Amino acid sequence: MAHPIDISDDSFKQEVLDSDQPVLVDFWAEWCGPCKMIAPMVDELAHEYDGRVKFAKVNVDDNPKTAMEYGIKGIPTMLIFKNGKPVKQVVGAVAKSVLQKNLEEATA
């Protein structure tokens, strides 16, 4: 079963920007209740989209450079990257269907 990979400021370019498939990046923190609430849903989506979309997590406390670079002001924030560029942004603990819709649009 596919799971989101943990990435850092150092591995962001290689894992996300240089990826040959779309990447959903979940910006989160250990102390964030809503982040923990959506984590199982993100895991489910990683399994459902295995082979079509890569899933990654960035801890904003440990990797402030990447969070700042993409203007992450609230968490959880999910950015969907395609061809090295952010194409969709979802902020907050949203329903699974909202993320699925954004993933479908980003991968169409």
Image: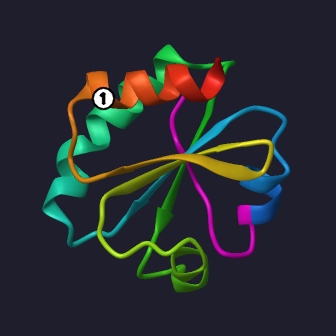
Q: Position of residue 53 (x, y in %)?
A: 63, 28
Q: Residues within 10 Å of mark 1 (few under 14, many from 20)?
A: few
Decide which of 11, 77 is in the foreground and name it: 77
Q: Where does residue 14 sit, x and y in percent of width and height?
A: 82, 57
Relative side of 31 to 103, left or right: left
Q: Is residue 106 above or below residue 50?
A: below
- Which span of residues is magenta-colored? 1-12
Q: Is residue 1 visible?
A: no
Which residue shows up at 52% across the image and 41% down it?
4
**In-image side of 83 versus 36 (left or right):** right
Give x and y (percent) for residue 25.
53, 50
- Pointer 1 residue: 98
Residue 28, position as x, y percentages in the image: 36, 63
In the rendered view, does 73 fall on the left or right side of 2? left
Q: Residue at x 64, y 17 (%)?
A: 108
Tell me, yes or no, whether the highlighted magenta stretch contains residue 8. yes
How many labels sit on residues?
A: 1
